[in-house]
Amino acid sequence: MDISKLDVILVIFQIVALLIAAIGHEIMHGLVALKYGDNTARREGRLSINPRSHIDLFGSIIIPLTLIVMGSPIMFGYAKPVPVDIDTVRDNGGYKACMLVALAGVFYNFFMAFCCVVILKLGLSFHLLDTQSLSLQFFFILLYVNIVLGVFNLLPIPPLDGSKALAYLGLMFNSSVFASLYNKFENYGMIILILLLLFPLTREAIFNVIRITVMMFLTI
C-alpha cells in the first residue's frame, strides 16, 4: 500500500472516530436528560445514531479537516448540541441530575476509551490484531480522540461540560458563584479556549494532561 493511500485511510479513520466520539457524547446528554423526564432530544430526533441528525458543518467537518491539514497533534471537533430542558431535569432530579446530564458525554467518551483499550489488549493477546494492522490503528485513534474530547470537555470554561458541572455542583451546596461565572463568560468561552491553545505554556499543559490520560488508560 503506498503512503498516499495510507494517509487517506488514516484521515478517514480520524473523521469517523471523531463522529463516533462527538455524536455519542451528545446522545448521552439526551439519554440522561430523558431519564429525568426531559424528552426534548427524543422529540426532536436527536437520540438517533444517524449522523445527519448531529453533524455540524463547522464543528464536525471544517475544524477537524483544518486540524488535519495543519498537522495538529490533536483531533478535536463537536456535533450539534443536543437540546435539553434543564428546568425539567432539575424539577425531577435536582441539581445532582443536572450535573449528571452535564457530565454524561464525558462519561461516554471515557467509557469508549476504556472499551478501545480492552479491544486492543485482547486483540493483541489473542493475535486477532497485528501491530501493523489498520484495525489496530483505528481503535487507537478512536481511543485517543475520545480522551481528547473527554479532557477538553472537563475544562471549566463555558460552555464546556466541566463548567456546567461545576456550576451545578455549586448550586447543590447553595453557592451560585460558579453559576454566575458561567453566565458571565458563556459568550466568551470559545475565545478563552482558543487563547489557551495559542499560548505555548497552557497548550502544553493541556496536551500533557491528554498524554497522561492516554497512558493511564493504556496501563489498565
Image (cartoon, rainbow, N blue to C red):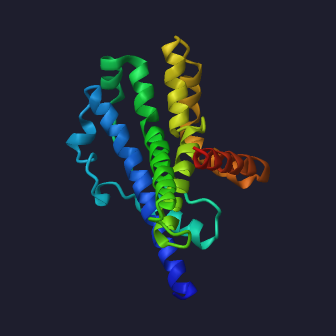
Q: Is residue 3 left or right of residue 126?
A: right
Q: Residue at x 20, y 41 (%)?
A: 43
* Quarter of the figure with the C terminus: top right
> At which x and y percent is residue 95?
42, 19
State which quadrant residue 111 falls in.
top left
User: As drawn, which residue projects farthest toward the top?
Assistant: 174
> At which x and y percent is residue 9?
48, 76
Q: Residue at x 42, y 64 (%)?
A: 16
> At which x and y percent is residue 120?
50, 57
Considering only vertical position in the picture, is 167 above or below 210?
above
Q: Is residue 152 left or right of residue 116?
A: right
User: As drawn, which residue projects farthest toward the right?
Assistant: 201
> At which x and y percent is residue 199?
76, 52
Q: Is residue 110 left or right of residue 50?
A: right
Question: Which one is nearer the viewer's eye here, 157 or 21?
Answer: 21
State which quadrant residue 56 falls in.
bottom left
Res. 137 visible in picture: yes
Res. 81 visible in picture: no
Considering only vertical position in the picture, is 160 above or below 140?
above
Q: Residue at x 40, y 56 (%)?
A: 20
Question: Which one is nearer the viewer's eye here, 160 or 113?
Answer: 113
* Number of numbered discs on residues: 0
User: As drawn, which residue projects farthest toward the front?
Assistant: 126
Question: Which one is nearer the viewer's eye here, 113 or 53?
Answer: 113
User: As drawn, which residue projects farthest toward the left?
Assistant: 43
Q: Residue at x 42, y 36 (%)?
A: 104
Q: Is residue 200 left or right of residue 20?
A: right
State which quadrant residue 37 falls in.
top left
